[in-house]
Image (cartoon, rainbow, N blue to C red):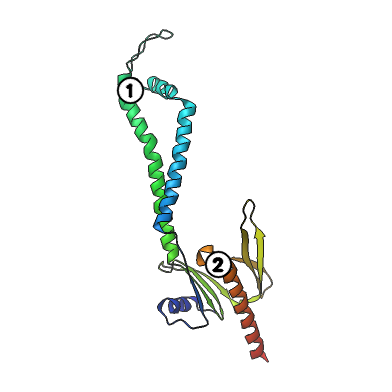
Amino acid sequence: MLNSDALLDQALRGPIPEDWRVFPGQGKPLWLAALSALITLIVLCIIELGLLISLGPLSILGWLVESNPGVPSGPQGTPHPVDYHHLIPLVQNLSLSFWIVPVVVALLVMVVGYRRGLAFRHSLMLLTPDGVVQCHNYLADPRDLKVLDFSQARNLVLQLSPNDGSSRARIWLDVERNEGHVEQWPVDTRYGSVEKIIQGIIEYHALYVARDEQQAI
């Protein structure tokens, strides 16, 4: 049985054995989070401009006239000149809110994206001769660990399936347990090349099986 916490601590503190492979997480940097926020801001502004054009400024102004009890109006059915100077503060407040909302949403996108990227930079995938330990944000307590113990795995198979509407294929590892059931083991691309990582896991598992068979003889 793998002692995942002990293996992870050794990988973080060192020294690292030569037959171990360490794949540190590559979180989203600040500039990429800012780029995501900028794209979000542009999209929201385009949507709001589209709404403004489709509704028309006169429709919005008419809504302000109807919803503002302070604006004088004549008897029903008779035109009455409206002093639109009374509506200037309302229009200013509406315009301010109209543009503040996208900015606030974009800032939230940047903060959340950067915090998630920062957490993933403190993540680690560790490949050892006895199994795989994956930890998302090893600074957290308790640690979010995912373990693949080679002693509990009968067979490993690389699986590949094209994504709908994407040129990139989806790659994962099918793990057949000793009990007979099969579970999927996906590998996050932020740890590096998925193909190389999965191929390394399969190679290490094959070496483990060969070593175990030799010990059984």
Residue 76 position within the rendered picture, expressed as x and y whole percent measured from the top left: 42, 9
Please say if 87 is above or below 119. above
* Dot 2 alpha-carbon crowd within 10 angstroms: few under 14, some 14 to 19, many 20 or more: few
Q: Residue at x 42, y 76 (%)?
A: 12
202, 72: nearer the viewer: 202
Label drawn at residue 87: 1
- Label placed on residue 57: none
Residue type, numbered disc 1: Leu
- From the viewer's side, name the closer residue of 23 and 175: 23
Residue 35 position in % (x across, y down) = 43, 51
Q: Residue drawn at (35%, 14%), measured in percent from left and top?
A: 82
Q: What percent of the width, then of the height, locates residue 87?
A: 33, 22
Hey, what amino acid is under mark 2?
Answer: Ser
Q: Judge the density around disc 1: few (<14), some (14-19), many (≥20) Cα neighbours within 10 Å.
A: some
The residue that disc 2 covers is 193
Residue at the spot x=62%, y=53% of the render? 166
Q: How many callouts does the rendering have? A: 2
Q: Quadrant of residue 11?
A: bottom left
Q: Is residue 29 left or right of residue 188?
A: left
Q: In this view, does 172 lie above or below 51?
A: below
The C terminus appears in which quarter of the rendering? Answer: bottom right
Identify the secondary structure beneath mark 2.
loop
x, y percentage for residue 93? 33, 31
Quadrant holding the N terminus: bottom right
Q: Do the residues labelled 2 and 1 touch (CB within 8 Å)?
A: no
Residue 211 found in image quarter:
bottom right
Whole-number angstrom distance, CA of label 2 to CA of label 1: 59 Å
Which residue sits furthest bottom?
217
Mark 2 or mark 1: name the one nearer the start of the chain.
1
Residue 213's place in the image compared with 112, above or below, is below
> Which circle, 2 or 1, is nearer the viewer?
2
Report helix, strand or loop for mark 1: helix
